[in-house]
């Protein structure tokens, strides 16, 4: 079976909260030093320390650039849901044209299993950004989490085509521990010019499937 390249294909289980750490300028003051150190510490996975540094930066100059965007995902990863939501809301209010912030906000809600809130967030975001493919994809995942498999499949199919849609459903099934539906989905994907990733997934599922 010949695989086709799939440049649009996504693995829908990555929320992409963390922004890459860019090259840092020489800090101009203690606040800048706190911010730069926080970014480095966060990139190494030390969320609590990074939060403390960003909060210290805010105390040093409350009139400085907002750090809500940086703190929202860190609070989420630290399990501080109320703080994270508050920061996301403030960051979105200050950056109303930022589509990725809205997507990350919805992802955070999904990770806390607050599915209906995530769907409301996504519906609101899509009213403003109807052509954003990441928002559409996250909405498909939210529909799956709600239990509406048909809606998730329809959304994925509209975005990526039939084979990639079934592949994504299989990935979500695997995450949910639903081996039966994952097998059905990946076998369906194989019938319609699958990507190389789909063929690899099918092989992996076959290798780990229980034997009769």
Image (tube, grey):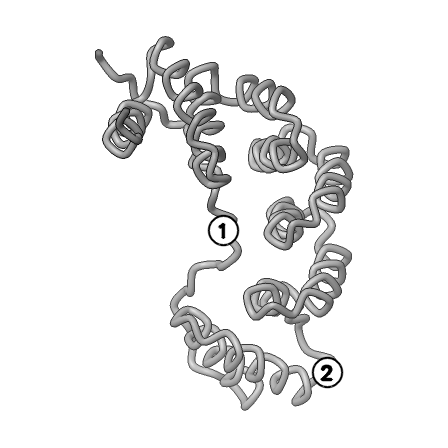
- In this rendering, the count of numbered labels is 2
- The residue wearing badge 1 is 16
Location of residue 197 with respect to 163 vertically, above or below? below
Which is in the foreground here, disc 2 or disc 1? 1
Q: Nearer the viewer, residue 13 or 58?
A: 13
Residue 156 percent coordinates (x, y) = 54, 23
Say which element carries label 1.
Answer: loop
Residue 81 percent coordinates (x, y) = 68, 65
Residue 74 percent coordinates (x, y) = 56, 68
Corner quadrant of residue 129 = top right
Q: Is residue 4 left or right of residue 88?
A: left
- The residue wearing badge 2 is 62
Residue 157 percent coordinates (x, y) = 53, 18
Please say if the residues under marks 2 and 1 sit with CB atoms less than 8 Å apart: no
Can residue 98 be seen at all in this image of the molecule?
Answer: no
Q: How far apart are the two marked residues, 2 and 1, measured between alpha carbons?
A: 28 Å
Residue at (64, 28) in percent of width and height: 131
CA neighbours of label 1 inside 10 A, class few (<14), some (14 to 19), many (20+): few
Residue at (49, 51) in percent of width and height: 16
CA neighbours of label 2 inside 10 A, class few (<14), some (14 to 19), many (20+): few
Can residue 133 be seen at all in this image of the molecule?
Answer: yes
Residue at the far top: name it.
191
Location of residue 106 with respect to 160 vertically, above or below? below
The answer to which of marks 2 and 1 sits earlier in the sequence is 1
Q: Is residue 181 left or right of residue 105?
A: left
């Amino acid at each position: 079976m010949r695989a086709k390249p799939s440049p649009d294909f996504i693995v829908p289980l990555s929320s992409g909260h963390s922004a890459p750490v860019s090259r840092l300028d020489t800090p101009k003051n203690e606040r800048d030093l706190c911010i730069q150190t926080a970014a480095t510490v966060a990139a190494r996975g030390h969320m609590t320390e990074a939060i403390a540094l960003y909060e210290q930066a805010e105390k040093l100059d409350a009139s400085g650039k907002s750090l809500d965007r940086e703190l929202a995902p860190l609070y989420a990863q630290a399990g501080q849901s109320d703080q994270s939501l508050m920061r996301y809301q403030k960051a979105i209010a200050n950056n109303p044209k930022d589509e990725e912030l809205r997507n990350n906000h919805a992802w955070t809600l999904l990770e806390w299993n607050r599915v209906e809130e995530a769907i409301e967030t996504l519906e609101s975001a899509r009213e403003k950004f109807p052509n954003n493919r990441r928002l559409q994809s996250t909405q498909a995942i939210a529909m799956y989490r709600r239990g509406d498999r048909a809606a998730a499949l329809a959304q994925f199919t509209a975005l990526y085509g039939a084979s990639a849609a079934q592949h994504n459903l299989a990935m979500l099934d695997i995450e949910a521990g639903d081996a039966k539906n994952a097998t059905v989905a990946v076998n369906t994907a194989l019938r319609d010019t699958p990507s190389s990733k789909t063929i690899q997934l099918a092989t992996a599922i076959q290798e780990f499937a229980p034997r009769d």
